[in-house]
Structures are given as structure tokens and as C-alpha cells.
Image (cartoon, grey):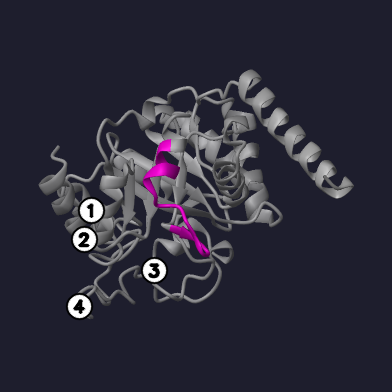
């Protein structure tokens, strides 16, 4: 046996020994259960109220999806000029309203004068809500108008912007004021944002994984050291794929479920995708088509 072969075998044996030792010692710690996430069947969250069925982020959309029996809503939030928390996705308002400019350039009262249904087209290309007087909502209004609905709140401003730097504290103060601790979850693509929010919440409110945490979990899952992964968040809000990497698999969902971390899949708008992910063990769906999603759930899971 040559020297190189001996060294390779020695290194390989050391690696196996390290893996065995870590396996014996490491004890993954499941996340503490959060009341807001206590569902025993897959849930449907209407994305921005169900943006393919009514003008997004308007009372028309949220009322429509609530009438279908959805379990809650998934919304994005931004700060207005007067530092109110607005339910809105885009940085600029001209894509969906008759105004033009950044959300941060307008006060809440100015934004509420906008026609929020101005640009709406449903999935069939119909423009039935154009200039129909639909109004945007503040997060306060949404939480007060639908007090029994679960709301997944997505902070999309970068923590390095002025609005993003203020959002965690503004959001915490609003939730605390309304006593909505047990019916919301807070997510962001930026792990730094949820970390900052949790400085205020102190683990009382469910928080979701950002992009870095998702990559960390998937890397652990695909390695031989998945037993060393301890989640720092209470839920995953993810697409079916991360680039070329499949996230919507039964094995990855189970990996997280064993750590008491439910997985909600976003942008799921087709029947086949819903059925496939239900069978894989998905905990919930964020969808633009709540009517279809509720039909699939009722036919295949029940209420």
C-alpha cells in the first residue's frame, strides 16, 4: 500500500470518526411551538388577498378570500412617509394605483386617496376593477378588520435602507398595541431583519427563515451533518425550488418537520403543484388563486 493511499484512508477514517462522534453527541433542538402556527392540516394563505382574483392589498381582495374560508393572508409591508405600516408589495405605487412614486414619498392619507384597483386585471385578462375606487389598507386596518385570521407579514425593505431600519420596531409596536402576538408570523428575505424584530419580540412571535437560513438548512440537509443543524426560526416560507435545488421534496419537508418547523410554499397557483406538495407534507400554501387552492384542500384534505 502506497503512502498516498495510506494517508487517504487515514483521512477518511478520521472523517468517519468525526461524523460518528458528532452523531453521538449532537442533539438537535426542535423549535418551541408557536400558537399562531398550530394548524393540524395544510393551510391556505391568500397572497396579498389573492391578487389574481381581486385588486391586491385591498379590502375587496381580503374580503373575497376570507369568504372562501382561507386560513389567513400573506402580505408585504412598507413604511409610508409618515412612518405608518402599509400593506403593499412594490417599492413604487404606479404598478397598481393611479399614483406615481415611491411608497415612502407619500403619507398614509395620501395613499388612501389612490385608486388601488386602477391597474387590476384578473387571470382572464378582465379589467372589471379599473377605476372602481378600491383603497389600500394599513396593516393596522387589516389586523382590526380580520381579527381571527392568521397573517404572515413579510418585511421586504432591506435593513440598510431608512425604511428597513425602522420597520422591525414599528412592526413590533403595532403588534404589541393590538395584542396580535398569537395570530401573526414575521418573515423577511433578510435574516438580519427578523433577528432585529426578535430583539423586541423575544421569541414570543413566530418568525420565518430568510434566504441565508434557508441555504444553511438545505446545505445541512444534503450533507452528512444534518444532525448538527438547529433552526433559528419557526417556519420556512419558500418556493418549490431554490435555483436548481428542489425544496419541495418529502425528505426536506420531513427534515424540518422533525425540528418542529412547518414549511409554507409560496407562488403555488396550479392544481398539480398543490397536490404534489400536499402529498409531500407541506404545512401550507401562499397563493394568488385562493379559490382554486381552497377547492384542492377541501377535495383532498378536508377542513
Q: Residue at (50%, 41%) from the top-left corner?
A: 208
Q: Quadrant of the N terminus?
A: top right
Assess disc 4: are there few (<14), some (14-19) or many (≥20) residues with their C-alpha within 10 Å of its C-alpha. few
In space, the residues marked 4 and 3 are separated at their CA atoms by 24 Å
In the image as oriented, which residue stretches furthest toward the front?
Answer: 1
In space, the residues marked 2 and 4 are separated at their CA atoms by 17 Å
Marks 2 and 4, the one that precedes in the sequence? 4
Residue picked out by circle 4: 124
Kindly state the secondary structure of the residue where label 1 is placed.
Answer: helix
Task: State the residue in front, 115 or 299.
Answer: 299
In the image as oriented, which residue stretches furthest toward the left?
Answer: 299
Q: Residue at (57%, 25%) from the top-left corner?
A: 28
Residue picked out by circle 3: 114
Contact flag, marks 4 and 1 (Cβ < 8 Å): no
Task: List x then y, in percent, for residue 122.
Answer: 24, 73
Marks 3 and 1, the one that precedes in the sequence? 3
Circle number at residue 275: 1
Relative to 191, 43 lies left or right: left
Number of the front mark, 4 or 1: 1
Marks 4 and 3, the one that precedes in the sequence? 3
In space, the residues marked 3 and 1 are separated at their CA atoms by 38 Å
Question: Which stretch appears magenta?
Answer: 241-254
Task: State the residue in front, 31 or 38.
Answer: 31
Marks 3 and 2, the one that precedes in the sequence? 3
Contact flag, marks 4 and 3 (Cβ < 8 Å): no
In space, the residues marked 3 and 2 are separated at their CA atoms by 35 Å
Residue 253 falls within the magenta-colored stretch: yes
Circle number at residue 271: 2
Q: Dividing the picture into quarters, in which one does residue 49 lie?
A: bottom left
Number of the front mark, 3 or 1: 1
Amino acid at each position: 500500500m502506497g503512502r498516498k493511499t495510506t494517508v487517504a484512508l487515514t483521512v477518511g477514517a478520521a472523517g468517519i470518526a468525526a461524523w460518528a462522534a458528532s452523531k453521538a453527541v449532537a442533539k438537535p433542538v426542535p423549535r418551541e411551538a408557536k400558537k399562531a402556527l398550530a394548524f393540524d392540516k395544510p393551510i391556505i394563505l391568500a397572497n396579498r388577498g389573492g391578487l389574481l382574483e381581486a385588486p391586491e392589498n385591498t379590502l375587496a381582495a381580503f374580503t373575497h378570500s376570507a369568504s372562501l374560508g382561507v386560513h389567513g393572508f400573506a402580505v408585504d409591508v412598507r413604511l409610508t412617509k409618515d412612518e405608518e405600516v402599509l400593506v403593499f408589495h412594490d417599492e413604487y405605487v404606479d404598478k397598481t394605483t393611479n399614483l406615481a412614486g415611491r411608497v415612502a414619498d407619500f403619507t398614509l392619507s395620501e395613499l388612501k386617496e389612490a385608486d388601488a384597483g386602477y391597474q387590476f386585471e384578473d387571470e382572464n385578462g378582465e379589467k372589471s376593477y379599473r377605476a372602481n375606487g378600491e383603497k389600500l389598507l394599513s396593516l393596522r386596518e387589516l389586523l382590526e378588520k380580520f381579527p381571527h385570521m392568521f397573517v404572515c407579514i413579510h418585511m421586504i425593505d432591506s435593513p440598510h435602507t431608512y425604511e428597513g431600519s425602522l420597520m422591525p420596531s414599528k412592526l413590533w409596536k403595532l403588534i404589541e398595541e393590538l395584542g396580535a402576538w398569537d395570530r401573526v408570523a414575521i418573515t423577511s428575505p433578510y435574516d438580519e431583519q427578523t433577528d432585529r424584530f426578535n430583539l423586541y419580540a423575544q421569541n414570543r412571535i413566530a418568525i420565518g427563515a430568510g434566504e441565508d437560513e434557508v441555504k444553511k438548512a438545505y446545505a445541512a440537509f444534503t450533507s452528512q451533518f444534518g444532525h448538527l443543524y438547529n433552526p433559528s426560526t419557526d417556519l420556512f416560507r419558500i418556493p418549490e425550488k431554490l435555483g436548481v435545488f428542489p425544496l419541495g421534496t418529502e425528505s426536506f419537508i420531513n427534515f424540518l418537520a422533525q425540528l418542529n418547523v412547518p414549511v409554507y410554499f409560496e407562488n403555488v397557483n396550479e392544481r398539480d403543484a398543490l397536490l404534489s406538495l400536499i402529498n409531500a407534507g407541506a404545512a401550507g400554501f401562499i397563493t394568488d388563486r385562493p379559490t382554486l387552492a381552497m377547492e384542492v384542500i377541501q377535495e383532498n384534505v378536508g377542513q
